[in-house]
Amino acid sequence: MPVTGLTSHDRVSPAVRLSAIRKQFLGVEVLHGVDLELWPGEVHALVGENGAGKSTLMKVLAGVYRPDGGTIEVEGDQQTFGSPREAQAAGISIVHQEFTLLPDRTVAENVFLGREPVRRGQVDRARLEADTAELFESLGEQGISPRTQVRRLPVAQQQVVEIVKALSTDARVLAMDEPTAALADHEVELLYSLVQRLCARGIAVLYVSHRLREVFDLSARITVLKDGSLVTCAPTSELTSESLVKHMVGRPLESLFPARATAAETGPVKLALRGAGNDRIRNLDLEVRAGEIVGLAGLQGAGRSAVARAVCGVQPFTTGTLELGGAPARIRSPRAAVRNGIAHVTEDRKGDGLALRQSVRDNMLLVRRAAFGRSRGARGVEELLREVAVVCRSSEQDVRYLSGGNQQKVVLAKWLAVEPKILVVDEPTRGIDVGAKETVYELLRGLAREGVAILMISSELPELIGMSDRVLVMHDGELAGELPAGASEESVMALATGHSLGMQEAS
């Protein structure tokens, strides 16, 4: 559901105008005279690779950094922000990618944290909860009680609380940094609706995301940064995914995907399911050969991740047969999967894939130590770091301080350390920039060339189609059909929604 909002022609001046913004750290300039205009009632997307300057520009807007050159105007008046509080006072708030909520406090206590209404020297809880309820009601969000403890809310509702908290300062400009990074596919639509309601209230939204589909669905205009410089600012209607990626990385979208395997380059079947099922999946038949990347598509809830969890022993199959290298196998636990040569890159790298407060080295050795003990001989940590191109100070650095793309590379390296024969990857590039995606694609294709059989799940259809040698599509817990390499997005979606169009192409 695209959000168009108002156009700049409907207003005399923008809500915010950044002109020729420059910023340097330790004598090195990281923003080189960047311009940005945000208009009331409009979603403006800000895109670029990691290191392009997006975060720095957002922090200048939010008062975290003072610019070393250029000007900031709010509704036509020039401003100088010395702190985030001063930016908030001018009507500018930011919703960070990492939630800043206190899980053991209520919704109302989080929304007005540090600004609680006071009566007779004590917090006026009745007014606190009433004011919070009024904020939610003004956005059409009435299903969240101000008295609920935040930890009891699903992630999507916690995101809503973050947005309402930002709006509670009477924000007229809202900057959102990767707002769907922690959301499931079906929760993204809820965010779309909320952004639409924000625009209807005349709020200017700056939307930062690596997900190009969201950028095109939501924004009226797109600004592209590269290496701290402004590349272009254009109406979304004048751009395509291909042209946007070319602006971001300097080359076309198609060039990001390595060449697919040929039939001669694939080997014997490494993984096969014969009538496999459990309480989420029914009668599943599939094969993945050595050297092959098989894509697994489907809508949220269709059973894609359930297949990954079952193959890897998290929620095992209860019916049918799983075969490894042509022989039936019983995989009843993740440890059994690892010992049988199966690796599982989960969709939630921070929740399931990494120990964030441990070092890069310890994370890379987690699986090897757990499954085989410390004596297992395999490639060393430093060799793997070079192979997957992790950018970090050293292998002793805490993994929480790495960028999303480098964290994802560490997750992959953790599994490469056990030299798997079968790799199941679920949303391998979620929340990482285009440049990091290309590195992950090369890693996956390189593993396939070495004979690893790869089952790849992705919600980004251009990625799934660009990477896969075949695409299997699931619908309602069953396999709906198979499509050849290079199939159209329309064919995949037709099968995913139970339509017959994809079946015609497959035949």
Image (cartoon, rainbow, N blue to C red):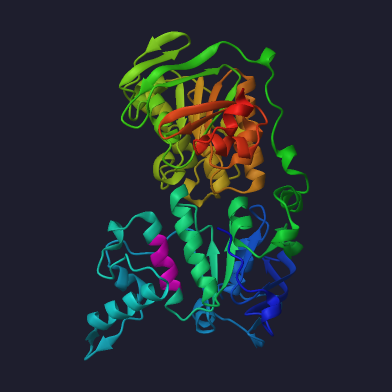
In the image, residue 220 lies in the stretch drawn in magenta: no
Residue 242 lies, in percent from the top left, at: 73, 47
Residue 188 lies, in percent from the top left, at: 48, 54
Answer above or below: position of 76 versus 280: below
Rendered image quadrant of residue 46: bottom right
Is 413 displayed left or right of 120 in the figure? right
User: The C terminus lies in which quarter of the figure?
Assistant: top right
Which residue: 47% across, 48% down? 185
Picture mark count = 0
Q: Does residue 440 show up?
A: no
Answer above or below: position of 16 versus 241: below
Question: Residue at the bottom extreme?
Answer: 120
Answer above or below: position of 260 versus 52: above
Of residues 276 and 96, the one drawn nearer to the viewer in this rendering: 276
Q: Does residue 4 show up?
A: yes
Which residue: 70% across, 31% down? 258
Majority secondary structure of magenta residues: helix
Residue 172 lies, in percent from the top left, at: 53, 79
Is 323 displayed left or right of 201 in the figure? left
Which residue: 76% across, 49% down? 246
Is 12 displayed left or right of 173 in the figure? right
Task: Give the extent of the magenta segment.
Answer: 158-166
Rendered image quadrant of residue 351: top left
Which residue: 37% across, 29% down? 281
Residue 154 lies, in percent from the top left, at: 34, 55
